[in-house]
Amino acid sequence: MIKKIVLLFIISIACMSASAQQFSTKNKKAIDSYNKAGRIRNNPAEAEKLLLLAYAKDKNFVEAAWKLSDLYAEMEEEDKQLQILEKTVNPKHPKYYQIVVKLGNAYYETGNYEKALEQYKLFPDKTSAHTYRCQVALTLKANPIPFEPINMGPINTEFDDYWPNISVDGQTFSTTVLVGKLPGRKPTSSDQEDIYQSYRRADGTWSNAAPLGPPIQTKQNEGTQSFSLDGRYMFFVACNRKESLGGCDIYYSIKEGDTWSAPINPGSPLNTKHWESTPSISSDGNELYFASNRPGGLGGNDIWKSDVTHNADGTLTFSMPVNLGPNINTNKDEISPFIHPDNQTLYFSSKGWDGMGKYDVFFSRKDAYNNWSKAQNMGYPLNTHRDEIGFVVNSQGDKVYFSSNGIEKNGRGMDIYEAELDESLRPQKVDFFIGKIVDDETDLPLEANVELFNMSDDKVISKTKSNKNTGRSILRIPSTGDDYGYNITAEGYMFLSDKITETNSGKETLIRLKKAAAGSNLVLENVFFASNSFELEEKSKSELNRIARFLNENPDVRVRFEGHTDSQGSRDLNTKLSDNRAKAVKRYLVENGIEDWRMEAKGFGPDRPVATNDTDEGRAQNRRTEMVVLE
């Protein structure tokens, strides 16, 4: 990303020496100073000195003033940007119209919308588009949203900080830092983008941001990071590497425990010889949003989306990207998409949609048919006349984090800010299943496969692996109103599945896995029978299919299915009922390919309670079906 910024600066200065330039002066010394400035590379102070000299030699040399104003704009010295243009205003000048528009644009770019309108009204027939955008900005400013941004303190460094990202549990914060870029100085090729992270302390404060370190951090540029919901995958951008297809490519890395893998460039079709940047991964891990100037867009940088396939070895495959279309993209630049964990709300920055000037933040919502609504400006004072980029919202949807150089005049350049997000701009509330998986005997964390499935059709909605160092895993629960369950498997252990309820949604659930050894037992929480019946309910098939998969993956295991009841009613009838229920489970598995000899079935009626039979809750626990490993 930094390479592109430097290149744009060099091009803008170099354009001053174009041979076809029609100057407003014939003063050869003034033109000579102007052209010398055009040959300056990465030295704004020297370019400024030469342009001032060129303008001093002839006050009619408006081209020198214009380029000097552009230079001040790049250096974020707004007062000087306006002052030099205001000196050029002369109705008798042959380029008076251009002077008026140039000054009006400068007023607009610095947030002086009323003064900009005054200039544009001097040529109303030619400046209607300019007038309209000023009126839009003034309307936004006259209707402010509730917004009180707070500088995030230790998360920010002395350099420019941008592209924030916060983990779904709100405990880890990451940023891109332009190391070496101090306020008031243009980026140079010696500056370097690195990924920094900060952690929330027990008292709620943040630790000082620190570099992520190798193998992600190198002597080259890395930034615009995005993490998968479970924290296992990190997507980021690196530029001008030997394996890169273009100037900037999207890379990803896989986390194993506390260690990140070497960066992986997935190549085509995700990356091209053009510019790809600012990736954002959806909460289900199935879609990657990013910005690119590749052919086929609407102009400039556009927002694109690629479908993601998770391979058995943990690597990823990306489909041919598709453009998000004219409700998101314009003929100007759109960058820094952020798809919220609700998978329906997209935030991004744009120069093309009507706003306050430069990059404003917009949002769009996806409907049931996957169509995006027309981009909507997030409003003032969230957006200013300066750049607002890298905008993310926490999983709860009530806090926003973004980078800006226009919130405070503190001389710090770009910083990260936090603010309450107005309710009208919030995404849908999202629920999560957060599991901590441990060995039942040792309490040590386990790396396990975690699946979230729809209990009505047994369809796997999303899946991940728990962190082997912490045992934690996170999956998003779709807000469809359906019943969902989770299934946990680990090599050498009994599988475990259960239904997701209000008690384990959004809260960390401790999941204890038992080793698949003789004597190990597992309560089949998702096997259901009608009252006083041994006919399996349809929703039991999800659990039974997982038992079949467990037995197929462990061909040496023999098991017994045991039926149990509470103590209410006749003991003989309860024993017979429990026996028939155990046999019904075995029969289903035989019909689905599991050998008969590998399974036994026996009912114990009320003889083996696990809780009191004096309460409804206790009796419910006693009515169960178990699977016991025999050998």
Image (cartoon, rainbow, N blue to C red):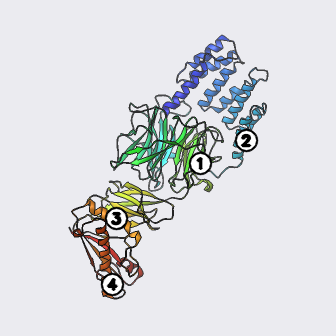
The residue sitting at the top extreme is 28
| Residue toward you, 421 or 558 | 558
- Residue identifier under label 2: 135
Q: Is residue 263 left or right of residue 55?
A: left
Give the CA separation, mark 2 to mark 4.
Answer: 78 Å
Give the CA separation, mark 3 to mark 1.
Answer: 42 Å
Which quadrant would the C terminus be assigned to in this image? Answer: bottom left
- Residue identifier under label 1: 363
Q: Is residue 430 visible?
A: yes
Under mark 4, the amino acid is Asn
Image coords of residue 576 (percent x, y): 30, 83
- Residue identifier under label 3: 545
Say whether disc 2 or disc 1 marks the residue closer to the N-terminus. 2
- Residue identifier under label 4: 574
Q: Is residue 560 left or right of residue 421?
A: left
Say whether disc 4 or disc 3 marks the residue closer to the N-terminus. 3
Image coords of residue 229 (percent x, y): 44, 52
